[in-house]
Image (spheres, grey):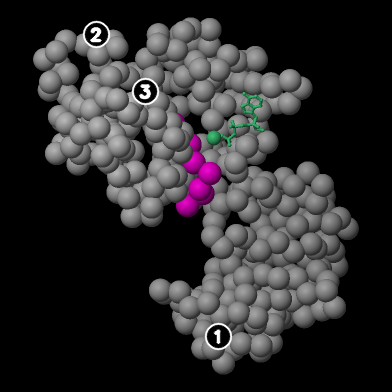
Amino acid sequence: MPTITVTNLSKRFGDKAAVDNLSFELGEHEFLVLVGPSGCGKTTTLRMLAGLEPVSSGSIRFGEREVSAIRPRDRDIAMVFQDYAVFPHLTVFENIAYGLRSRRAPRALIAERVPRAATMFRIDHLLKRKPRQLSGGERQRVALARAMVRDATVYLYDEPLSNLDAQLRHQARDDIMTLHQQQQRPSIYVTHDQAEAMAMGDRIAVMKDGQLMQVGSGSELYERPQNLFVAFFIGTPSINMFEVELRADGERISAVGSAFTLGLPPELQARVAQHIGKRVTLGVRPEDMHVPKKAPFAVSAENTINGLVNVVEPLATGSSVYLSTLEDKPHDFIATFKVRLPASYLNKEIPLAINMQKIHLFDGETEQAII
Ligand SMILES: Nc1ncnc2c1ncn2[C@@H]1O[C@H](COP(=O)(O)OP(=O)(O)O)[C@@H](O)[C@H]1O
Ligand SMILES: [Mg+2]
């Protein structure tokens, strides 16, 4: 199986770039998740890979072979669409067999593969039915089975689970991953849901406005986002952002916000040196804010932000606490605790100890990560 190499791929509709200079590579057994908000160019990217949309510029290679000008059917791609169009007049069996028949696969192969794919997706008892006699989840599984019976070179999924309820979605996700582990074909899975992306991808590519923001493993994106967008997009609840100015006092560098002053760890000094006196955005993940007596580090005024507790939301394990800074124009932020915070904290002012080893800083203008 080939690797897939996308280089400087662009698609313009009129003067708008739906996909803007996209480059990435996909290993031969890899499952890449493409994630980003609605309208960022995910579907357009997949359609160019499948050959359903002509490219404006750039190159798509399967192995050594340039495919960007090759007809869709010669690219040998299996694609599952968002609206999982199944043919209403065909039975489940014929729907699943469709791709094989249109490629003139031998009868014996069809007779063997269709029931096997149907069994895999737990629709083997429905093979004689028509789509209107199926639930939404069953129809979705027909569309997945149809894509899967073929030995395609590449598998593309365009938000195939967004019309399913949460439980079916989990099940279908597992089905797709199981199948991928069996087939080991290069696959690209599109979703707008960062939690789904984190759950499924070997690697995740984050897009915004047609451009690639970062590619990496889930933990890389979470722990080392290269820019503000990725930091904010990955993780629930989202990372907290505070506008601060970096100030130097001899060796010591502080992040000065309107309601707090935090001392930066000495090892960060070299990397922030160019940003002294400038406005930067401080990012703190909700789980890196602790009740002082539970903090796994020494707490002082140098690593504390005070907040007013507005809402305490109990979670299965622990709690999410919605706070605001103590100032004229309060700034909202969220802390998540592994312990259940008693409701008596409501409307109280409490100190939050910040794990300064885990903070993020972004350039105020370019929004690129400084550390
Ligand atoms: N056929 C088209 N003609 C004009 N604009 C389009 C067309 N298809 C998509 N777009 C625009 O391109 C951008 C990316 O769309 P799309 O790839 O569908 O995004 P996503 O799948 O990430 O939601 C959007 O602004 C969309 O309106
Ligand atoms: Mg789309």
Residue at the spot x=40%, y=74% of the render?
316
Q: Is label 2's Cβ within 8 Å of ligand 2?
A: no
Residue annotated with mark 3: 78
Vertical comparison of 43 with 316: above or below: above
Q: Earlier in the sequence, mark 3 or mark 2?
A: 3
Local SS, label 3 = strand
Residue at the spot x=32%, y=28% of the render?
88
Percent x, y of residue 224: 58, 50
Q: Residue flagged by tag 1: what amino acid is it?
A: Lys
Q: Is residue 95 left or right of residue 127?
A: right
Residue at the spot x=83%, y=62% of the render?
245
Residue neighbourhood size for the residue with mark 3, other residues' Cα within 10 Å, grouped as few (<14), some (14–19), many (≥20):
many
Query: Which residues fall within the magenta stretch?
Result: 187-195
Q: Is label 3's Cβ within 8 Å of ligand 2?
A: no
**Ligand 2 shown in quarter:** top right
Residue 244 falls in image quadrant: bottom right
Percent x, y of residue 290: 57, 76
Residue neighbourhood size for the residue with mark 2, other residues' Cα within 10 Å, grouped as few (<14), some (14–19), many (≥20):
few
Q: Is residue 362 left or right of residue 258?
A: left
Residue annotated with mark 2: 104
Residue 142 falls in image quadrant: top left
> Which of the two marks, 1 or 3, is nearer to us in this view?
3
Q: CA distance from mark 3 to mark 2?
A: 16 Å
Q: CA distance from mark 1 to mark 3?
A: 55 Å
Percent x, y of residue 101: 25, 13
Q: Which mark is residue 293?
A: 1
In the rendered image, residue 192 lying in the magenta stretch gets the answer: yes
